Image (tube, grey):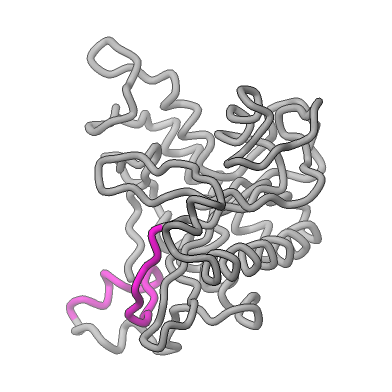
């Protein structure tokens, strides 16, 4: 599994790379897989990725790859929210609910939730957007025993990671996990975990409820894309994407690096 420097937002891959992104996300994922391996098995084989490629290919995989087990991926994303932000905040404003979960009245943008909420999403086919779904719909997709196991494991992974990050001065506002089944049908954590691509990281000391937070994640790119224009019109969130300006590329790379520096040191 090789992580490139390309970045996706709104399920569309940007044309411009973010320098260093692939290596950074790989190193962060490896850190979290190691810290959380006592909770659930993950997809790592434990072998060096460079041991299975040719000499000519080693530079392509160095620092940005993981040698992983072959799994049957599940058609859901396991999203856990500790705070109200992003699509969750938008849905709350419309219905006071997220993915069928009713929340208390009076919450604000970036409010801490009474307890972490499991809010799954369905994986869309290429070219389409993932969609938030209810837990009942998730049961229809994967069955009740597996849905319950994924929910419980995801909530534990989030809680453990949030406690670790809190000690480093970082709030993990929300994150997503992906799972597959191994050859014997065992649930296995896969893909990347707890990176700036899959999570919202906020600086604890700057946190203010009801305000936009100082974040070190992909939200900076999403915010720029929300107002970006393509061919004179606001971008419709479909390929092809608008070109990322140098400033957006630079700031995103800096944000990702700051997240790793704070969490891994």
Q: Residue at x 41, y 27 (%)?
A: 225
Closer to the camera in the image, 128 or 145: 145
Image coordinates for residue 56, horizontal then vertical, percent: 17, 78
Residue 197 in sight: no
Q: Where is residue 99 in the image (x, y as percent from the top left)?
A: 58, 41
Task: Check the image and name the residue furthest to the top.
Answer: 232
Residue appearing at x 66%, y 48% in the figure: 81
Query: Can you tell which quarter of the image residue 4 is in?
Result: bottom left
Measuring 35% from the left and 42% from the top, which residue is drawn there?
A: 11
Indicate the quadrant containing the C terminus: top left, top right, bottom left or bottom right.
bottom right
Query: Who is closer to the viewer here, 16 or 12?
Result: 12
Residue 192 seen in the current view = yes
Image position of 177 (left or right of 241): right
Q: Where is residue 154 in the image (x, y as percent from the top left)?
A: 61, 64
261 up-or-down from 49: above or below: above
Find out whether residue 4 is within the magenta segment.
no
Q: Position of residue 168 (x, y in %)?
A: 76, 59
Up-down relation of residue 140 to residue 184 (above or below): above
Number of numbered labels in the structure image: 0
Residue 192 located left or right of residue 6:
right
Q: Is residue 74 magenta?
A: yes
Which stretch appears magenta?
Answer: 56-75
Q: In which quarter of the image is the N terminus?
A: bottom left
Task: Name the residue: 35% across, 31% down.
Answer: 244
Q: Is residue 22 above or below residue 57?
A: above
Going by the image, does 135 lie left or right of 232? right
User: What main secondary structure does the magenta stretch of the protein show?
Assistant: loop
């Amino acid at each position: 599994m090789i992580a490139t420097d390309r970045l996706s937002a709104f399920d569309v891959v940007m044309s411009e790379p973010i320098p260093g992104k692939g290596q950074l996300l790989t190193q962060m994922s490896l850190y979290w897989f190691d810290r959380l391996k006592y909770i659930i098995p993950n997809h790592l084989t434990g072998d060096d990725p460079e041991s299975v490629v040719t000499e000519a290919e080693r530079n392509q995989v160095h620092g940005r790859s993981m040698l992983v087990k072959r799994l049957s991926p599940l058609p859901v994303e396991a999203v856990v929210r500790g705070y109200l932000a992003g699509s969750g905040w938008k849905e709350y404003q419309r219905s006071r609910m997220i993915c069928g979960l009713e929340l208390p009245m009076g919450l604000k943008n970036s409010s801490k939730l009474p307890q972490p909420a499991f809010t799954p999403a369905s994986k869309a086919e290429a070219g389409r957007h993932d969609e938030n779904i209810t837990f009942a719909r998730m049961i229809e997709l994967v069955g009740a025993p597996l849905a319950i196991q994924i929910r419980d494991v995801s909530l534990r992974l989030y809680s453990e990671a949030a406690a670790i990050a809190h000690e480093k001065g970082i709030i993990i506002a929300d994150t997503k996990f992906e799972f597959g089944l191994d050859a014997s049908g065992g649930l296995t954590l896969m893909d990347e975990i707890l990176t700036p691509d899959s999570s919202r990281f906020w600086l604890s000391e700057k946190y203010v409820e009801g305000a936009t937070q100082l974040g070190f994640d992909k939200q900076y790119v999403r915010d720029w894309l929300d107002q970006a224009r393509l061919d004179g019109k606001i971008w419709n969130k479909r390929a092809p994407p608008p070109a990322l300006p140098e400033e957006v590329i630079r700031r995103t790379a800096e944000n990702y690096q700051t997240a790793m520096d704070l969490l891994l040191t």
